[in-house]
Image (cartoon, helix red, strand yellow):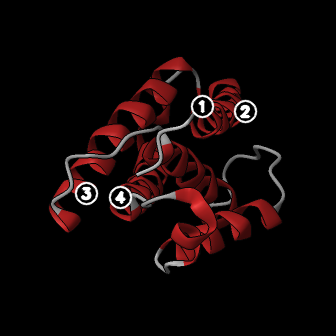
Amino acid sequence: MHFSLTHLLFNCLWVYVVGLEIQKVQGKLALLLIILASGIISNFSEFFLYGSIRFGGLSGIVYGLFGYCFSQEIILKKHQFGFPPALYTFIFIWLLIGYTDILYYLGFGMVANGAHLGGLLSGLLIGIILPKYNRAWK
């Protein structure tokens, strides 16, 4: 578990940067839905996969936002948020590295892998489902 000011600021920065782009393209309601759904799903994922009740941060939401953008930009080619493909590659690699002990030994503490994975998958799913109802989102 890593509760630190750096962790919080890093997550807040990504929520701001990615969330702002989603809000510009999809509107506030869609952003709120993605944040709420990925937050709930990522927390339950961490609990059900690892039984952990001691985790924190916005990482699951960050992964949800990136999953949403990835599904829209790369999979469906619907909306352009302007993120380079290398950023998505980094996010996926960081997720995989989290499943190793490397980050723990580098001083990051325990990583909420279930929250990260749950957030990513929920964002991907919302990104695939949401366009079917996009008339109601702006």
In the rendered image, residue 92, in percent from the top left (x then y), is placed at 61, 70
The residue that appears at 51% across and 68% down in the rendered structure is 104
Mark 2 or 3, nearer chain start: 2
User: Closer to us: mark 1 or mark 3?
Assistant: 1
Q: Quadrant of residue 86?
A: bottom right
Where does label 1 land, which residue? Answer: 5
Where does label 2 land, which residue? Answer: 17
Q: Secondary structure at mark 1?
A: helix
Tags 2 and 1 touching, CB below 8 Å: no
Where does label 3 land, which residue? Answer: 45
Please rate how many residues cluster around mark 3, counting C-alpha atoms within 10 Å: few if below 14, some from 14 to 19, many from 20: many
Please rate how many residues cluster around mark 4, counting C-alpha atoms within 10 Å: few if below 14, some from 14 to 19, many from 20: many
Residue sticking out furthest to the bottom:
100
Q: Nearer the viewer, residue 24 or 77?
A: 24
Where does label 4 land, which residue? Answer: 118
Task: Give the residue type at disc 3.
Answer: Ser
Mark 2 or 1, nearer chain start: 1
Q: CA distance from mark 1 to mark 3?
A: 24 Å
Q: Secondary structure at mark 3?
A: helix
On-image quarter of the C terminus: top right
In the rendered image, residue 66, in percent from the top left (x then y), is placed at 59, 51
Please rate how many residues cluster around mark 2, counting C-alpha atoms within 10 Å: few if below 14, some from 14 to 19, many from 20: few
Q: CA distance from mark 2 to mark 3?
A: 25 Å
Q: CA distance from mark 3 to mark 4?
A: 5 Å
